[in-house]
Amino acid sequence: MLSKADALNENAVFYGNPDRFAEELEEYRRVTPADISRVAEQYLTDKLLVMSIVPGKKPASQNITGEENKPTSTPGKKAENKNLTVNLPKPGPDPRFSLPKIEKQKLSNGLEVWMVRKPELPLVSMNMVFKTGATSDPIDRAGLALLTADLLDNGTKTRSAVDIANQIQSLGANLLTAASWDDSRVSAFTLSKNLDKVLDIFADVITNPVFPESELETIRRRLLIGFLQRKDNPNLISDIAYNSLLYGKNHPYGKPINGYENTIRAITRDDIQRFYSTYYRPNNAVLIAVGDIDKKTLIPKLEKVFSEWKPAEIPKESVPANAQFDKPGIYIVDRPGAAQSVISIGHIGVTRNNPDYIPLIVMNSILGGQFSSRVNMNLREDKGYTYGARTSWSFRRGPGPFAASADVQTAVTKEAVVEFLKELNGIRGSIPITKQELEYNKQSIIRRYPQGFETINQIANQLSSLFIYDLPDSYFNEFIQKVNAVTIEDVNRVAQKYIQPEKMAILIVGDRKVIEPELRKIEGWGQKITYLDPEGNPIKVE
């Protein structure tokens, strides 16, 4: 909806015609090979500029008068405020939301198929979701789920990586692969008239990947280059060190999804083939199809393209529940000369299936889940320490991390930590939640909720959570009602129960020599400082 509004607005402002997108589409259709040759000759010439930037001493400043930077036009007439609405209109009733019925059928090989018919546009979105992700990586092969997913569309028994890319592109379709903590997936998006052709490629990628050694090395090199860049990104360093600190290196959540340099170097094609053969099975997956589809015609097509895909026994695995962070204190990853400090404060949180999930997201909205939240109003709007402060719960199959975080000016690192601690303690009772806060945040959640279901891709992605976390089909249709039912007693209870300041890690990535003396002044925390390397390992410093 927002992108449609932007397109209408842009066309109205620049062309005086909100409907110009139809004309623009026709302009694309009229482009000929001769047009492409003509503009290539006109613009892709040998009149090139090559700029080399060599680090060195700062050159002496030049005597610039500023004459060349004077405006070449006179300022326009100042707009007059006429007929402006002074009073904002009152909000309307809560939005009505109802997800179309999910039709379900199981194929002969055990594959669950979920279908939602949305025929308004000639488009189809498909998600093949596997209930296996990075939590199934062996500890010494961190990144295996990601590498497996990345390689799926890089070659099959009958198509090369280039063939797959060219065929998908020629059909105006998209084909994507991904892996997260709790799932791996293959997604396709296409015009309904091209569904048969795209479905053939989609099924081929899922059932016949060959994981070419050359493509594996290409992706491996890309990841290793990314690790070099990661070392210069304080936010990524913070994420990796924070998770390692809370969970330890022997817990699935204690390592990054894309692994480490040594684990990525260690992964072999045999490892990938074994992971694929173990988990990429029809009885470990659901196919979600949304859009201009018909069950009577779709099911026979699916039976045909997946007929050779066989089920197998899937290892019964669960996320270890034994992660217990028992060393609260301040932890510093040193970045000498850093202009900012990256702060993460928190502890191990809760699972996605926690019965208090909805009261928790309401409480988090008040605390740090949106712009007008307590921590952002304090650290950004009141104190000016940061461009944005936030709190978040990573809801997963196992207990994910809770974190309050911000990038702040180095000089106010201690002050920012103190304000975070004040807000984290305040939400537990010393700064009571008001009825106004509760209602405002409930309405914020409720009114933006339907935006997550505007497109068929969004619907397909939302439905995947029902499968991954074993949620009931009625979950989405009951969500608004359940948010409305949250009371002040509920948010006070979950704040008291789940925010635990005495168990918190305070991780700071910043200039140790500048920030440590001030951090040692924080009452109750200043004498508990530990130093970490960028991967979260304890180190000694002089």
Image (cartoon, helix red, strand yellow):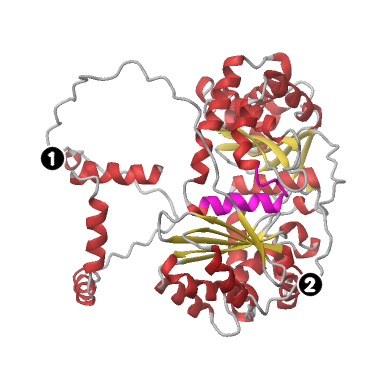
Q: Residue at x 73, y 76 (%)?
A: 310
Residue 307, picture quadrant: bottom right
Q: Residue furthest front?
A: 296
Q: Residues within 10 Å of mark 2 (few under 14, many from 20)?
A: some
Image quarter where the C terminus lies is top right
Q: Earlier in the sequence, mark 1 or mark 2?
A: 1
Amino acid identity at mark 2: Ala
Q: Helix or strand or loop: what does disc 1 sit on?
A: loop
Residue 462: where, in percent of width, then height? Answer: 59, 49
Marks 1 and 2 in Cβ contact (< 8 Å): no
Image quarter where the N terminus lies is top left
- Disc on res. 312: 2
Q: Residues within 10 Å of mark 1 (few under 14, many from 20)?
A: few
Height in image: 419 above or below 137? above
Residue that numbered label 1 is attached to: 72
Considering depth in this image, is 530 or 250 the residue closer to the camera?
250
Q: Residue at x 71, y 37 (%)?
A: 402
Q: Residue at x 78, y 54 (%)?
A: 252
Residue 238: where, in percent of width, then height? Answer: 66, 44
Residue 81, picture quadrant: top left
Amino acid identity at mark 1: Thr
Considering depth in this image, is 237 or 5 the residue closer to the camera?
5
Q: Considering the whole magenta stretch, tell me its main secondary structure.
A: helix
Residue 311, picture quadrant: bottom right
Q: Residue furthest bottom?
A: 158
Specify start and end residues of the magenta stretch as a single range: 458-474
In the rendered view, does 171 fall on the left or right side of 485? left
In the rendered view, does 167 fall on the left or right side of 211? left
Q: Residue at x 24, y 48 (%)?
A: 19
- Disc on res. 401: none
Q: Is residue 429 visible?
A: yes
In the rendered view, does 29 fall on the left or right side of 4? left
